[in-house]
Amino acid sequence: MANPDPAHILQVGMGFFASKTLLSAVELGLFTQLAKGGLTAAGIAGALGLSPRAIPDFPDALVALGFLERAGDGPDAVYCNAADTAVFLDRASPAYVGGILEMANARLYRFWADLTEALKTGAPQNEIKHTGESMFAKLYESPERLEQFMNAMSGISAANFSLFARTFDFSPYRTLCDVGGATGQLSCMVAAANPHMSCTSFDLPVVVPIANRRIAREGLTGQVTAAGGDFFSGPLPKADVITMGMILHDWNLPDKKMLIAKAYDALPPGGAFVAIESLIDDARRENAFGLLMSLNMLIEFGDAFDYTGSDFQGWCREAGFRKFAVMKLAGPASAAIAVK
């Protein structure tokens, strides 16, 4: 047996070094700046307004972490984006996922400093702790802040929603309602990949203009509709397929079961309910991201949590569903499917 090695312990324990270096690079717009052309370290400092002390440690750390590439050595070396950061962290790229990192930098990074308190108390550690207002209350105070948050969620959901839209068998169905549809992203992707589908993005009335802008931009007006409503205060719109993308994990168990029951009531026989989340593996050993996301739900909401495919099946069976499947999507995400 090999001697124990502390490398993994130290890498994870000090992982916030690397995390904050990347988050600051996104906040500063470094990858967007380098998309215009390579720069020396001094050029980076000038473009971003950095202290001379940040040079060359900051860009060289990003090289060592694999986020930048460097041609040459010394002061004349030129830095450019790595292949993945060029695609995913340039704000001008349609595949930009940095919105979620911007939110992590602005909010979650500091809230996670109070994880120990959350573990001891079970209480949320976000805005509600400091101001008495919930995260959603703060977001919905400002349409601009709300749209920024929803765009951040769109970035991290894009690959999963696109794969679901192209992989799920929509041939038996004609209508879809995406509950908590935000910008209308999932509805638009399903409609674009399946021209026979008529889709509704259902969210609070304040969100409808945000979704309408996306629907019009995608040229899907008529095939995709944005509808306003509150999934807590009334029934869900009727549809052959009901989807919830990153919705169920926001709530405690009674609310999860209530939403599942509403989905059941809104579906015809043979209709499908689909929850797209970072499903935790049933053995709770492998999907570290899903488990950490569940801890993030503790930070954000206290009693909210992520779940396994087996958990989902049990709750859906209780609501009356009879057929179940899990479809692997991109990265740690999956689609949990229940058929009425």
Image (tube, rainbow, N blue to C red):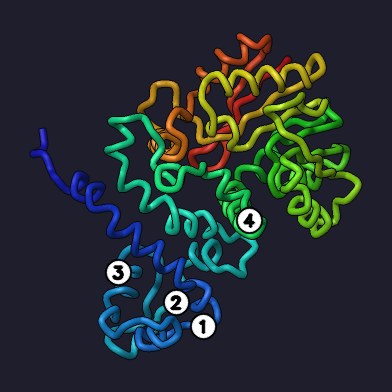
Q: Quadrant of residue 17?
A: bottom left
Task: Please tell me whether mark 3 sits on a helix, a strand or a loop.
Answer: helix
Residue type of the residue flagged with mark 4? Ser
Which amino acid type corresponds to the residue marked 1 in the rendered image? Gly
Rounded to the nearest angstrom, the CA distance separating label 2 from label 3 is 13 Å
Label 2 – label 4 distance at C-alpha: 36 Å
Among the two numbered marks 1 and 4 on one chain, the one whose residue lies closer to the N terminus: 1
For disc 1, the marked residue is: 37
Q: Position of residue 307 (x, y in %)?
A: 48, 26
Residue at 45% of width from left, 47% of height from top?
131
Q: Say few, some or many: other residues with alpha carbon within 10 Å of mark 2 (under 14 / 14 to 19 / 20 or more).
A: many
> Residue tagged by mark 3?
61
- Mark 2 highlights which residue? 80
Disc on the earlier residue, 2 or 1: 1
Task: Tell me the residue that label 4 is attached to.
Answer: 142
Where does the C terminus fall, quadrant-wise? Answer: top right
Which residue is rendered at x = 81% and y = 40% of the image?
227
**Which of pointers 1 and 4 indicates the residue nearer the eye?**
4
Which mark sits nearer the N-terminus, 4 or 3? Answer: 3
Outermost residue toward the bottom? 76
From the viewer's perspective, tell me whether residue 320 is left or right of residue 3.
Answer: right
Task: Confirm or deny contact between disc 4 and disc 3 (CB under 8 A).
Answer: no
Q: Which circle's residue, 1 or 3, is located before the other in the chain?
A: 1
